[in-house]
Image (cartoon, coloured by chain):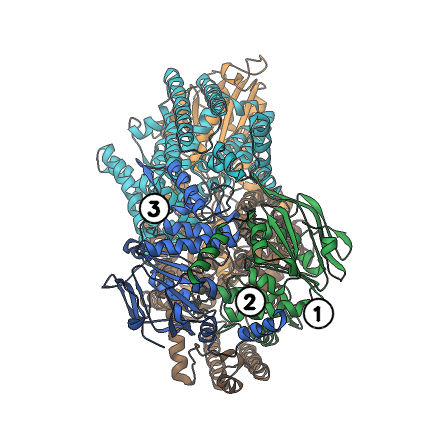
Chain colours: A orange, B blue, C green, D brown, E cyan
Amino acid sequence: ACGANEAQTGGEDGASESQVIALLLPESKTTRYETFDRPLFEDKVAELCEECEVVYYNADQDEAKQTQQVDAAISEGASVIVLDPVNGAGAGGMVQSAQDAGAQVIAYDRLIKEADYYMSFDNETVGKMQAEALVEAMGDKGNILMLNGAPSDPNAAQFKAGAHSVLDESGVKILEEYDNPDWSPENAQSFVTDMLSKYDASEIQGVYAANDGQAGGVVAALTGGGVAKDALPPITGQDAELAAIQRILAGEQAMTIYKPIPIEAETAAEVAVKLAQGEDIGDTSDTGIDQTEYEGVTSYIFTPIVVTKDNVKDTVIADGFYETSDVCTGEYAKACEAAGIS
Amino acid sequence: MSTSDTLAPAGESVLSLAGVTKRFGAVQALTDVHLEVRAGEVVALVGDNGAGKSTLVKVIAGVYTPDAGDINFAGKKITVSGPAEAQSLGIATVFQDLALCDNLDVVANLFLGQEKRVGPFIDEVAMEQESWRLLKTLSAKIPSVRIPIASLSGGQRQTVAIARSLVGKPKVVMLDEPTAALGVAQTAEVLNLIERLRETGLGVILISHNMADVQAVADRIVVLRLGRNAAEFKVEEASTEDLVAAITGASDNVVSARAQREGGHHG
Amino acid sequence: MSTSDTLAPAGESVLSLAGVTKRFGAVQALTDVHLEVRAGEVVALVGDNGAGKSTLVKVIAGVYTPDAGDINFAGKKITVSGPAEAQSLGIATVFQDLALCDNLDVVANLFLGQEKRVGPFIDEVAMEQESWRLLKTLSAKIPSVRIPIASLSGGQRQTVAIARSLVGKPKVVMLDEPTAALGVAQTAEVLNLIERLRETGLGVILISHNMADVQAVADRIVVLRLGRNAAEFKVEEASTEDLVAAITGASDNVVSARAQREGGHHG
Amino acid sequence: MADDVTQAAVAADLADERLIRSQGPRDMLRTTWNRLKSGELGSLPVVLGLIVIAVGFYAAEPRFLSSRSIVSITQFAAPIGIIALGIVLVLLLGEIDLSVGSVSGLAAACAAVLMVEKGQSEVVAILAGIMVGVAIGAFYAFLNTRLGVPSFVFSLAGLLGFQGALLYVLGRNGTINLPSDSFLVQFTRFEFVSPVLSYVLVLAIVLVYAGSQLWAIRQRKAAGLSAPAMGVVLAKAGALLVGLGAATYYVNIDRGWTYLWVFFALLVVIMDLALRRTRWGRHVFAVGGNEEAARRSGIKVDRIYVSVFALCSTFAALGGLLAAGLQTSVSQASGTTDTNLTAIAAAVIGGTSLFGGRGSAYSAMLGIIVLQAIQTGLNLVGVDSSVRFMVTGAVLLLAVAIDSISRRARASSGRG
Amino acid sequence: MADDVTQAAVAADLADERLIRSQGPRDMLRTTWNRLKSGELGSLPVVLGLIVIAVGFYAAEPRFLSSRSIVSITQFAAPIGIIALGIVLVLLLGEIDLSVGSVSGLAAACAAVLMVEKGQSEVVAILAGIMVGVAIGAFYAFLNTRLGVPSFVFSLAGLLGFQGALLYVLGRNGTINLPSDSFLVQFTRFEFVSPVLSYVLVLAIVLVYAGSQLWAIRQRKAAGLSAPAMGVVLAKAGALLVGLGAATYYVNIDRGWTYLWVFFALLVVIMDLALRRTRWGRHVFAVGGNEEAARRSGIKVDRIYVSVFALCSTFAALGGLLAAGLQTSVSQASGTTDTNLTAIAAAVIGGTSLFGGRGSAYSAMLGIIVLQAIQTGLNLVGVDSSVRFMVTGAVLLLAVAIDSISRRARASSGRG
Ligand SMILES: Nc1ncnc2c1ncn2[C@@H]1O[C@H](COP(=O)(O)OP(=O)(O)OP(=O)(O)O)[C@@H](O)[C@H]1O
Ligand SMILES: Nc1ncnc2c1ncn2[C@@H]1O[C@H](COP(=O)(O)OP(=O)(O)OP(=O)(O)O)[C@@H](O)[C@H]1O
Ligand SMILES: [Mg+2]
Ligand SMILES: [Mg+2]
């Protein structure tokens, strides 16, 4: 195995300057990670540091796999590990392995209390913003169905907690609550369809759906249950999926949560490069985010944006998150026009 | 037809059945069957295909539970709840459908359920040695005892099944068509074996379609027809023609017709 | 030992093998075997257990590919790549290990691969009717043809397997111990059947351990021993003692010993 | 012989004197009871399990048995039911296909991309989706018959590989919404059989059933074989008429039968006919029961494998397309989650053996109804997710345990 | 007779003249080659597949074969390997257990709650976790042997039910972190065999192997049976010494063998001995090969089922505890994701048949190493998820296809 063990004794080909930064993302079922986070992060690192190498891993929503990937990153000689944990609460062990091997850990997008740095849109805040938007759209009264994420996904619990903190205080009544076993649109659809056997469609004045996938299932169920497309109750979402943006334009979904990923990815890249090169990271990042303290971790907290029909143009389109041509296909062309997108 | 009481030779009754009945779905396989075997006696059970012989054997061996009827073993009424119990009573059986484990080798099959051990482990060497000895007494032509049973010829498999019944210390041995697939030499060995078993005082139930073999070794011949007792003979009293007539239920049957034709042909 | 040329009766050679060799792992099952069958001839293949008879049959039937050797069928050299091809050539086989589908009923097994049809559908009624006819010619004692094969007795299964070979129009029929599990009446029917097959000009290969049956229907007897041709007899020339000696490879064997003892005993 | 005289009067297949004859309704009932006890009544016990489930959920939430709820159970059961139909086929051969979920997702994704992003017509897109299934099945068959790779392994590889292909095909945008006026969406979601047509259909089914039975009786009598009594056949047809009619009346209170369900039912009936009444089907059972015996009978075993694997993947693709229509979109999660397990479980719960040679097309339908009913019931009752998982497991066990215990009751060599 | 003279000189098991004898190394090689061709060499082809995988990934990324990477492959393979060991047992009976993932998660959760929230000692917690496995296995055995529920069904119910129980046990807090000084965490993550001890172990293993072989030779000779030549045994022992020694040297470049892996290897060896050399193991194979024959041989079949299901669930629980230690936490997702499929796949890829009666304890080890190597390799190469899934599928297929093709080559009745 000639060459196999070289990484452990230093860099490659004698270029001892080379720095390895590891990026570990949690899953591939949601588009954002491989479509946005990874390329944005890699591009930014390349821009800031020529001799830096990014190694990338995706854990496919499997904690055990991620544990092992941290180990692999260490064997690749990573000095900074940017870790978006499958389960932030249980990621302490991974952080410790990394720190024992002399690497610094940036908790990316999801909090790890043991990490050196943390940067994210806060999950509970996301849940709150969804709930607030829903309550507002319903005029603080009426009945809703609540569809949460997978009970086996710890992040889902945080969204759920955030949303409850608002909903429970409001005038909105939760008719039924459902923890979707795997976030899947199918389950969301069959749940809501079954609810339509239990309640009349008119009794449902709003739906909290934790993410856009489920929102799609909810829309399909309601329209399949005889609710006209223009009479749909407000439905929430999260992730700003393309399909959700289209639904928002068409008036089928009330809102989604857009996390401007560029700022998050680029801040992470900046901090990672500085750490790798042993530079000082300062109080404010070059991307303009102030350092704060969150749960005892040095943090950069970004504000998520609520996307509704009114601000699609100024958010996802303006940021180049989606091209107009992606959004305004076929039957959505008219809606685009109405929203002033062309 | 005469009752078994008048026919039975000397020796204790080790096994006796009365009124045994068994049905499978819409088929009445056994109706009110009785049978008795004494120590040191070879009882041949004959009958046409589907007469119920194997079913009877399986009832005795605990494979099937009879729908009705009594089984007495060594004078006591028993209910055989499973093959393990029949074996522990001392009933060894060679089934017609052999019942060997195709994935195991010859040695493992021979000693299945009665493995020799040293400490917690199986004593392979002792078992292999004993296997060769057992197979040799039956003139088995098996090239290796370390190949899976699946790759043996029909007769080789049957020899293994017969050898199995000699492992352990049975009181009654039931052989369901043991010589069907055997070569001439092996058949002769099995007939010798049956005679040896009788001499050591065991009760033997032999099922066979070969009247010559039956007449050669049996003491008493019980005929089943369509699931019922049809006749019973002492071997000295039974001619081949009588037996065939009792089995087929008619004295002018295809067998006698053939015999006549052959006789005319060759004779 | 004499070559087949001098022995063969009149009739075209339908099947001839030369130099057939087959090994399984460390066991040499067949070594340089030759065999010839002519139209209207019954060739008996005899030999001890494990002599290689069934292996030879399976080679001809396309189940095994021989390691060496030629097979000629109706004068042409052929390579049988699988059982389907052997069947389409006109070779029908009753295997010793029967090869029936336990989950299918009697009718389905009888016509497997040769189902009668009306339009796209199987003609169950015609097949059932024909089944009863076939089974009756063999004196089968099968209560219902609509039960799965698994619940038949050994002899009933064998009867079904034999009846199968009569479906279709074969040129050569190979019967591997067809009467092993059969009752006396059914055995007689099968021997009659073999004679009928010969009369219609088919070549028949019969494997059996029953010398009386062999001598009753065969024209020629080929003896295999330990995977090699050991001897060949015209049936008129062969005494039972000669046959047994050729099979076991010794004239003072357990069979003759038993015969002597019996003779002494009874006679 | 005396026997011959009676034999002439008795049908050929009832001549054996060991047969316990059943004449008259009393005997019929007894025979049926005996068959039930001996585990020969196939799916009846699972139906009993289903009834227990229905009663239980009805007690907890009466709307479980509402017309609307039953319509949506059937509607949502259909796409995975179609996938389960393919699974039944591979299980009959004693093989397995773990990749039906991924294949269904991939087929739907291909169709959606062609239709929405590449601007192809819907017909082309649907055909392409189905062709994906056919091609995958053919590839599987090649791996199995030529290279001898076990089906567990290649379908496991397919499960992963085609999930990757799904992600690749969907590309960076992820979810694709199907146009709401597309045929797939309309057919799966909004097409209901009109009341009049539905009653006509019921009548037609009953007539075809009765007709074919009566024809069979005539044939059998003509061939000198026993035949069921005319009265029995008519009674069965009557029961069918009442059963189907009542169900139709009940679902017509809501929107009526969906065409999606009718399509699924039609596929089940066709596959049932193909399996029980054609040569191909007979050979599938033969290969599944004893492959070597089938080969020696001259059956081209490889062809059976090819056809079965191809059909299974094709059904998977078809099910995936319909699921996408029902959901109006295709996403990275399409077909990946529980689809495999649900489809296999449906086939097994319906009574198809994992070991080959035993099962029926109806098992796919029965099994998926059981699973869908449990899910709907739990949705309506509305419990915590931990309780939901536990209850799903318990109810599933209950549904099948009734079946098992009834089979168990047969006095035989034990586990048989 | 002439035969008898020679027979006295030849061992009893080599007397048959049809046996092709192999004496001398030349014959040995030829015999080995023949056995390889006829598919009798068990796991060798999968090992070849593993080598192909290793070479491939090494070419793409040399660090794949680095000492560190190999240490972590073995470390992470161990917990699921232990679960796969239980799966091997149920597969040997021709049964299946789909619930090992849920059981492993539940056991870990119970232990974690007892330890962290209820303040019990670690020993109590671990024992309780293992008891959860034992209890579940006993319950399964009851369902199977008394009620006759098929294992596919009850383990599917268990898959769902015990996942619910996991959620219930963890309660609303979800993730529980294990104390980093706990034995489980320390043992699974930080305990490495010291270099000296590791060489001592290697030597001990080789000596035990050679000793037992030589003893067997003596026994066989004494019994008049053939025995392998002394030289061959010594050569094999030498090869073992060199192989193990070299591997040990190589992993010692990094941290050395983990105790976790050594523990797994020990379990595999114990199970292998239990399966091949004890009565119980013989009976497991017998029941898996032909249950009816086993029953008729007087084997208490039910007891075999009870022991196997109990062992399988116990191994699952044990694997779950170790996985939790390695991960330092238990969460709602513990054991839920791919655990079941990975464990079953490992057993099957390693060469254990899904249909019972064929397999070995080593297949769990071999299979999990193949799977873990593929995963690590792809981690190191670092590609998009879509590519990663596709490559995983392809590599898996490749690894097993080599095996299949080699078996295929045996000239026999076709698919045999
Ligand atoms: N498990 C079963 N299920 C249904 N029917 C069965 C079963 N076992 C046997 N039978 C039926 O019972 C009858 C008697 O079968 P049995 O095997 O006892 O016959 P046998 O006398 O041994 O015949 P043979 O001489 O052919 O071996 C047959 O008609 C057979 O079809
Ligand atoms: N598939 C196989 N694998 C390995 N060995 C085999 C296989 N088939 C047959 N053999 C061996 O080949 C030899 C010949 O077997 P074959 O079945 O041809 O014997 P046979 O003459 O038919 O014997 P019988 O009279 O007992 O039926 C036997 O020693 C057997 O062990
Ligand atoms: Mg019998
Ligand atoms: Mg043979």
Instruction: Report the side of D97 relative to C68 (left or right).
Output: left
Instruction: Report the side of D366 relative to E183 (left or right).
Output: right
Label 2 or label 1, whichever comes before in sequence order: 2
Q: Nearer the viewer, mark 2 or mark 1?
A: 1
The subunit carrying tag 2 is C
Q: Work out whether E39 lies above or below B49.
A: above
* Mark 3–mark 2 distance (CA, rounded to whole Å): 37 Å
Image x and y of residue E356, in percent: 45, 48
Task: For mark 2, give the secondary structure.
Answer: helix
According to the picture, the residue beneath numbered tag 2 turns out to be: C160
* Mark 3–mark 1 distance (CA, rounded to whole Å): 54 Å
According to the picture, the residue beneath numbered tag 1 turns out to be: C200
Q: Work out whether D386 lies above or below E400.
A: below
> Can the viewer see residue E98?
no
According to the picture, the residue beneath numbered tag 3 turns out to be: B114
Q: Are marks 3 and 1 in contact (CB under 8 Å)?
A: no
Q: Quadrant of residue E277?
A: top left
Q: Work out whether D191 lies above or below E402.
A: below
| Residues packed near mark 3 inside 10 Å, few (<14), some (14 to 19) or many (20 plus) | some
Disc 3 residue type (three-letter): Gln
Q: Are marks 3 and 2 in contact (CB under 8 Å)?
A: no
